[in-house]
Amino acid sequence: MSPIKKEDINQEVFDLYDDYCHNKIDRRNFIEKLSVYAVGGLTVASLLQCVSPDYKNNIQVKVDDPRLDIETIAFTSAKGGGSIKGQLSKPKNLNNQLPGIIVVHENRGLNPHIADVGRRAGLAGFISLAPDALTPLGGYPGTDDEGRALQKQRDKNEMLEDFIAAFEYLKTHPNCNGKIGVVGFCFGGWISNMMAVRVPELLASVPFYGGQADSEDVPKIKAPLLLHFASLDERVNKGWPEYEQALKANEKEYIAHMYPDVNHGFHNDSTPRYDEAAAKLAWKRSIDFFKEKLV
């Protein structure tokens, strides 16, 4: 049987996967609901394999890329999880200072895709730090299902403190000039919005399809925002009108892009939710934004 194409999958399958990824339904319920769409030569197993991430064959910047210096570091998060590990990426043989980018993972820890995104930020001319908020529980466990289960055990506000601590660590790194932005995906998008609220020194925030800050917190935002949304992502998008209204009312600097006909997770190239054109455009816009605000 030839591989399943993205076009062969009913949109409701992507919606189910989104519910599953965000703990709205458990794995048993997900499989049961998926069976409805196992028709016309499709099987539950083939659908499940298709929508599940394939990290092995979808890494853009490898961990041994000769253009980068990549290391695992640890920093202290006194108000969060204690000692937190992260991937630090920077251009090879760097002997000067660069702006920094905090790269924030989804709701499953620092998986291979987000680590890859961190390395992409390094190649773009920044020093990037991609922390793993699952460090207190042993770190990303190797699969997203296990990662989601572990991340549910942590308090999201304590994890926010971990990423604020990452900002403080990067700010004093000898290769960082102290000009720092943040980019995050899904859960990391919410972290990016909340770091804009909590960190006055943050100079740029780029949430990808992330939950919004409460309207009463918007006056605290000082960082310019570049927000990316997927038009088919009803769950996240329902909070955008109120957030935008608050941003306008408080005269905050922001740019928002709504990408047509794409799903939540469209930037993640390890699953069929990936949309190449939208992902490349969103990433280019993000890097251009960071260069404008940080360089």
Image (spheres, rainbow, N blue to C red):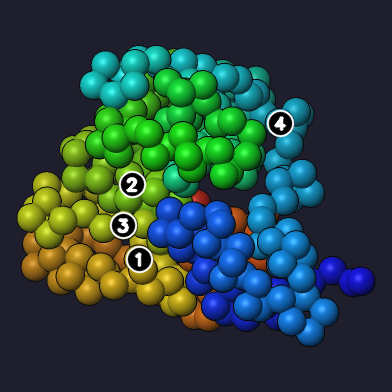
Q: Amino acid at mark 4?
A: Val
**In front here: 212 or 6?**
6
Compared to 143, does 189 lie above or below? below
Q: Is residue 173 visible?
A: no
Residue placed under numbered mark 1 in the picture: 236
Q: Amino acid at mark 2?
A: Ser
Residue placed under numbered mark 3 in the picture: 211
Q: Residue 44, how many percent across, how many down? A: 72, 67
Q: Earlier in the sequence, mark 2 or mark 4?
A: 4
How far is the residue under mark 4 from the one under mark 3?
30 Å
Q: Earlier in the sequence, mark 4 or mark 3?
A: 4
Q: Residue 50, how many percent across, how many down? A: 72, 63
How far is the residue under mark 4 from the one under mark 1?
32 Å
Q: Quadrant of residue 142?
A: top right
Q: Amino acid at mark 3?
A: Gly
Look at the numbered disc 1 and give the secondary structure of its residue: helix
